Image (cartoon, rainbow, N blue to C red):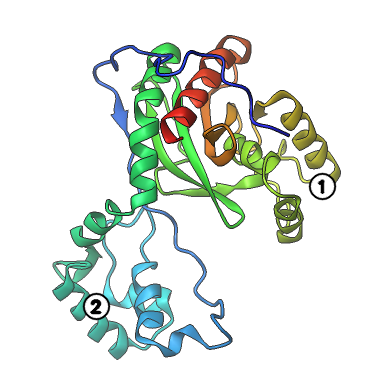
Amino acid sequence: MKAPADVTPAGHHPLAHPAPQGMMYAAHRAAPAPVNEEVGGADPMNSVLGKVRPILEAFTSDDAALSLAELVRRSGAAKATVHRLAQELVTWGLLEREGCDYRLGLRLFELGQRVHRQRILREAVQPYMEDLLLITRETIHFAIHDSLDVVYLDKIFPHRGLNAESRVAGRLPLYCTGTGKAILAFSPPSLFVDVVRGGLKPITRHTVVSPGRLRAQLDRIREEGIVLESEEIRLGYASLAVPVFAGGTTLVGALSITAPTYRMDAAGYATALRTAALGIGRSLA
């Protein structure tokens, strides 16, 4: 299936309006990834970096600070090791002391802003996301694919409400999110196989957990180039999403509008969403 054809003149910004005042940006850290995976057949916990990783990933987006005892419990490393490495991480600025507790350091934020791919993508998508926010007054997401999840690269929302399940740098499953389904539909078939093998677990009573139904959904998304996900990730919320192709051919992520189901105007938002995706794709070409 080819990417949707460009329908706007080259070089023209299809949604050229100033961003509204008073809009809020959400910025949260990702939940920790599992640390018991093997790399090259060796136990990663035997290396220094293998011990540092679970310490840093012990922090979730809800943690302002953690005690040494909690770092030991979550990391699974010896108390003496955690204490020594935590002190070194403080010296490097990757952790900071808060009384007797530890919190993630500013140096991590600085390093994260240097990731070239994500920085270029965010710079490209933000003007279009702001314009969609102006048009819809609903939550706007841009997500990319990593493993069996979508990772939210950016999210903007008005004061009147937000979908708390998503957060910048947060992860959600490919199979039950609007952005995830849009990405999955235009990805190689092997990704679908991996997703099914990983398990389709219900998040709400509306989550599609049948491989056959999910495959049918993806077939329809490939035909229509757009997906409406309703209450699969959170009751009372729906998400309208489209894939984003750099230069019209290379899948780079997905763009979505999320709103309470009673406010979701899929027919009214579709054109603006498609146009924004095309604009982002041209800017990345």
**What's the residue at 61%, 32% (across, down)?**
235
The label nearer to you, 1 versus 2, is 1
Residue 138 % position (x, y): 45, 20
How much space separates mark 1 and mark 2, taking CA atoms?
44 Å
Q: Is residue 72 above or below residue 113?
A: below
* Residue 230: quadrant of the picture: top right
Q: Is residue 268 above or below residue 256?
A: above
Residue 64 % position (x, y): 27, 56
**What's the residue at 82%, 36% (across, down)?**
216
Q: Which residue is mark 2?
A: 86
Q: Secondary structure at mark 1?
A: helix
Q: Which residue is mark 1?
A: 211
In the shown orientation, is residue 106 left or right of residue 159? left
Taking depth in this image into account, of 215 and 253 the one nearest to the observer is: 253
* Residue 41: quadrant of the picture: bottom right
**Residue type marked 2:** Ala
Total of numbered circles in the picture?
A: 2
